[in-house]
Image: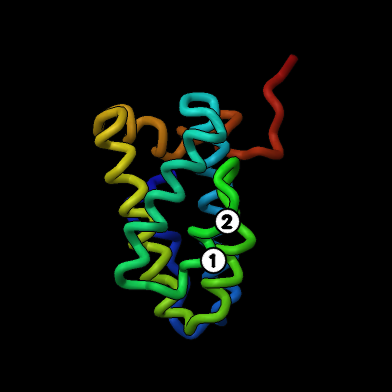
Amino acid sequence: MQIGASRRSPSSEEPRTAADAAVAAWEEIGTRLAPVLGRRGVAALYRRSVHLTLARYPWLAPAYEAPTQVADLAALHAALEAQDAPVAEAASAELLANFRALLITLIGDTLTARLLAPPPPGSPDADPAKEPPP
C-alpha cells in the first residue's frame, strides 16, 4: 500500500465512506509497521502526524487527545465522518503525508517505500484470504 495519498473515493460519496477508507488504510499501516516500530512506535508517529495536521484541520483534535498506547482509529473515524467527503479526504491525505514524511526522517525514504509499497501480485500478502501452502 502506498501512503503518499489516501485511498480516494469520489467526492459524491458520503463522509462515512471516506472515514472507512482512512481507517482501513491506517489499520494496514499499523499491521505493516508494528513488526518494525512496535505498536507504541506506530502510535507515537500517528499521534505526531495528527498533531501536525491539526494546524489545517483542528477538528481532528479528538484523534490527538486519544490514549497514546495505540492509535485511536475510532476517534479518527468519528472526526472524519463528521465532515463533508472532500474535506475528510483532504484531511486524511494530509495526515498520511505527514506520517510518511515523519517515517522517512526516522528510517529513510528507501525503507519507507519498501514497507509501505503494495505487496507483489500473487504474494500471500496481496490477498489476505489466501494462505500460503503448508
Q: Is residue 112 above or below residue 102?
A: above
Q: Is residue 14 above or below residue 110?
A: below
In the image, residue 54 lies at what x, y percent?
Answer: 37, 66
Q: Looking at the rendered structure, which numbered label has been put on residue 47?
A: none
What is the secondary structure assignment of the residue under circle 1? helix
Q: Residues within 10 Å of mark 1 (few under 14, many from 20)?
A: some
Q: Residue furthest top?
A: 134
In this figure, which residue is indicated by the disc labeled 2? 66
What is the secondary structure assignment of the residue under circle 2? loop
Q: Quadrant of residue 59?
A: bottom left
In the image, residue 1 lies at what x, y percent?
Answer: 44, 44
Residue nearer the viewer, 111 or 38: 38
Q: Is 35 placed left or right of 90 in the picture?
A: right
Residue positioned 27% across, 45% down in the render: 101
Q: Residues within 10 Å of mark 2 (few under 14, many from 20)?
A: some
Distance CA(mark 2)–CA(mark 1): 6 Å
Kind of residue at badge 1: Pro
In the image, residue 134 lies at what x, y percent?
Answer: 75, 14
Contact between labelled residues 1 and 2, with CB atoms less than 8 Å apart: yes
Q: Is 132 placed left or right of 59 in the picture?
A: right
Residue positioned 45% across, 60% down in the render: 7
Q: Is residue 52 above or below residue 103?
A: below
Kind of residue at badge 2: Ala
In the image, residue 20 lies at what x, y percent?
Answer: 59, 65
Residue positioned 32% across, 52% down in the render: 98
Residue nearer the viewer, 26 or 10: 26
In this figure, which residue is indicated by the disc labeled 1? 62
